[in-house]
Image (cartoon, rainbow, N blue to C red):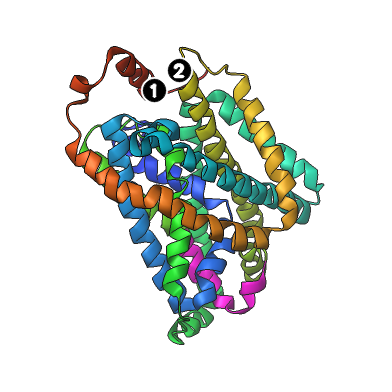
Amino acid sequence: MKFLTGSFFKKYLLPGFVFQSVVIAGGYGTGRELVEYFLSYGPLGGLLGMLLTTAMWAILLAVTFEFSRKFHAYDYRTFFNKLLGPFWFIFEILYFILLFIVLAVIGSAAGVIIRDNFGIPYIIGVMIMLAAIGFLTFKGSNMIEKFLSSWSILLYILYGLFLIAALLKFGPRIQENFSNGVMLSRWSLGGFKYALYNLGVIPVILFCLNHIETRKEAVSAGLIGGLIGIMPGFLFYIAVVSYYPAVLGQEIPAVFILQKIGSPLLLISFQVILFGTLIETGTGLIHAFNQRIQSALRAKGKELPQWQRPLVAAVLLLIGLGISTFGLIDLIAKGYGTISWGFFVVFVIPIISLGIYKIIHRKNPGKLKNKKESEYEAQNNEKTTFH
């Protein structure tokens, strides 16, 4: 795994893999999001929506990465304090709503995967996920970076095999459905909304950006990150088109397609990898909140005790599980769609307007900071690890 510790990987690829890791399991890994926001507009309409999402991700990631580098903002509290000033807390309100919706989704999915595929009680799956997230948050940023990036590479390999198997089994069906050219109206709205609510998790990955040193690295990492984030979804989308429109009503479309393929080994492997993506997303979201707490405490000259990190994870995940009773499809269709517009107003518009302005007009930070602010940012810029 020497590749994962190299300078090139950390600067240009790690942010994209971490972004993809945090995005994937809120329904992406199960295929539910891709069906809801893309395939529901027809095979061709969904493909165009996916291209729109990719472009939006790439641009916003690039600007965000450069703003983070420029202002040494490696947690969302610092980032939005620099971007929105005293109104930064509005993002945190939206983030908490998103956090609990996503934790509800992954908690529900974890229990379903373990119960339906391995015959293990629902609660055991939830407890395994909770223990894994608690362990990773306890170990800190260094361990989290390694886990998220390593698991993402495994996921890429599996999705590649998934696509190959689907093409071999359903090649003519896939070709026919794409050839029909079904493109329902408002496909752009689906791609736009999907991009927006996922952009809300970009501030979650700020902790891994302190390897970036120049504007070229920041912008390049952002553009590459957009492609890294969407590629597994693109591979899955091609495969799932084979059973359009029957797949639209499936709660976990990925399992539905794998069962149609008829490969027990691929199905089991997918379940294991999918369960890992649930851990990835939960860990990323909760770690970002822990980093926000750490940032606030450091401003007061204090530190977040190591043992409290998994405790925070447990409390947040249990609250999310209480929400999961609403059902996976309803959570994704209603919860995510509504909050998309909040992130558009609070994050997207400010970063592409005020954020770019501040990047351009940012003077030498060393001449502007007082001693206390400089010490705080220096501490915040350090890579947090726990051993």
- Which quarter of the rendered picture does the N terminus lie within? top left
Mark 1 vs mark 2: in front: 2
At x 43%, y 78%, the residue is 44
212 or 176, nearer to the observer: 212
Q: What residue type is disc 1 on?
A: Asn
Q: Are marks 1 and 2 in contact (CB under 8 Å)?
A: yes
Q: CA distance from mark 1 to mark 2?
A: 8 Å
**Number of other residues with Cα within 10 Å of mark 1, as a class: few under 14, some 14 to 19, many 20 or more:** many
Task: Name which of mark 1 and mark 2 comes first in the sequence.
Answer: 2
Rendered location of residue 141, percent (x, y): 47, 28
119 or 228, nearer to the observer: 228
Image position of 270 with respect to 355: above or below? below
Residue range in magenta is: 233-250
Kindly give the residue lying farthest to the bottom in the view shown.
Answer: 180
Image position of 347 with respect to 370: above or below? below
Q: In the picture, residue 52 is in which quadrant?
A: bottom left
At x 51%, y 15%, the residue is 303
237 inside magenta stretch: yes
Q: Find residue 380 and name its label.
A: 1
Number of callouts in the render? 2
